[in-house]
Amino acid sequence: MPTKPSVLVTRRLPSAVLERLESVCDIDLHTEPTAISRESLLARVAGKDALVCLLTEPIDTAVLDAAGPSLKVVANVAVGFNNIDVAACRSRGIVVTNTPDVLTNACADFTWALILAVTRRLGEGERELRDGRWKGWALDHLLGMELRGKQLGLVGMGRIARAVADKAPAFGMSVAYTDQVVTDVPGATAMSLDRLLATSDVLSLHVNLTPQTTRLIDQKALVKMRRSAYLINTSRGPVVDEAALAWALRERVIAGAALDVYEREPVVHPDLLGLENALLIPHLASATTETRTAMADLAISNVLAVLDGRPAITPVP
Ligand code: GLV
């Protein structure tokens, strides 16, 4: 009887999803609730046919060397894949997959949750109430910004940005965007990044992390924004220079920011932590039961396809 292919899975996945994989493969599962250590990853990936990993694990040449020639597929349970050295995988014939589409709706909903929460100062209000500092209803208490009639600026116009844009009419917002490739989106106005920075009331980031987008929103970009504007980041932390953002929030160069992602997760720049106009969320954009299950399921389907000699369903572009 031929031996089953072996798969390293770096975090617990929903049991129904694991069962699908278990019926065909031998699974080496990292069961701790915290991320697999680098040491353990390097040791356990040796000789595996497939690796199912998360965005918390850098998959670089050292991991690929440790895996050896048996490794055929690296399936990231995430849409972003900046944690994987895709070129190194390709040069070794290893397929890399991600989990697009299944998380688009959850991430778009979440972007709106951040937009509403930061413009209506929900974090500040909740902290005040829980700290026992609330003195009662007042006409000028924690006034925020109304969305109706304002411009939503989207940096990047991929799947998630489009889903965010689709919901803008419900809040009476116009949509403008900047994108390297996409030039024609019905109902939205394309413009340069500089113009988007200067004219948007809410600026939301939806780009992949690449050398070109690293620190795209730095001090120079922040000073181009309106003093009344809000920055939303659900993409990747390093797209924003956190120290510059903390300065801009402290000096009221912009009105507020809502962040789901950070430069060095789970570490958050200490200057951000004390700022009332920063809404800080621990990387939750895709965190619904439905979406996380679908992401895990898609990752496993990718592994099974490649191990079966079929094309991956969602190879990274
Ligand atoms: C989450 O950040 C993802 O890339 O799926």
Image (cartoon, grey):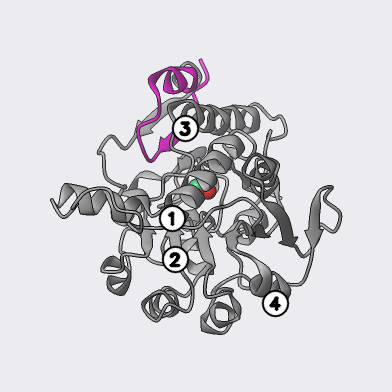
Q: Which residue corresponds to mark 1? A: 118
Q: Which residue is mark 3?
A: 292
Task: Find the distance from the CA under tag 4 to the CA under tag 3.
Answer: 35 Å
Residue 79 x %, y % = 57, 45
Q: In the rendered structure, are the residues bearing label 1 and label 4 in contact, judged by CB atoms less than 8 Å apart? A: no
Label 3 element class: helix
Closest to the observer: 25 or 293?
A: 293
Q: Which mark is residue 194?
A: 4
Tell whether circle 1 marks a residue whose Cβ is less than 8 angstroms from ligand 1: no
Along the line of sight, the residue nearer the viewer: 279 or 292: 279
Q: Position of residue 103 (x, y in %)?
A: 57, 37
Q: Amino acid at mark 3?
A: Arg
Q: Nearer the viewer, mark 4 or mark 2?
A: 2
Query: Is tag 4's residue or tag 3's residue first in the polypeptide sequence?
Result: 4
Q: Amino acid at mark 4?
A: Asp
Say whether disc 4 or disc 2 marks the residue closer to the N-terminus: 4
For marks 3 and 1 on the same chain, the one whose residue lies earlier in the sequence: 1
Q: Is residue 127 magenta?
A: no
- The residue under the point 48% across, 41% down is 51
Q: CA distance from mark 1 to mark 4?
A: 23 Å
Tag nearer the camera, 2 or 3: 2
- Secondary structure beneath disc 2? strand
Q: Is residue 153 left or right of residue 280?
A: right
Q: Residues within 10 Å of mark 1 (few under 14, many from 20)?
A: many
Q: Residues within 10 Å of mark 3 (few under 14, many from 20)?
A: many
Q: How far apart in space, not on screen, are marks 4 and 2 (Cα)?
A: 19 Å
Report the mark closest to the observer, 1 or 4. Answer: 1
Q: Which numbered disc, 4 or 3, marks the residue closer to the eye?
A: 4
Q: Amino acid at mark 2?
A: Gly
Q: Magenta stretch?
A: 1-21
**Residue 170 higher or lower than 43, as above or below:** above
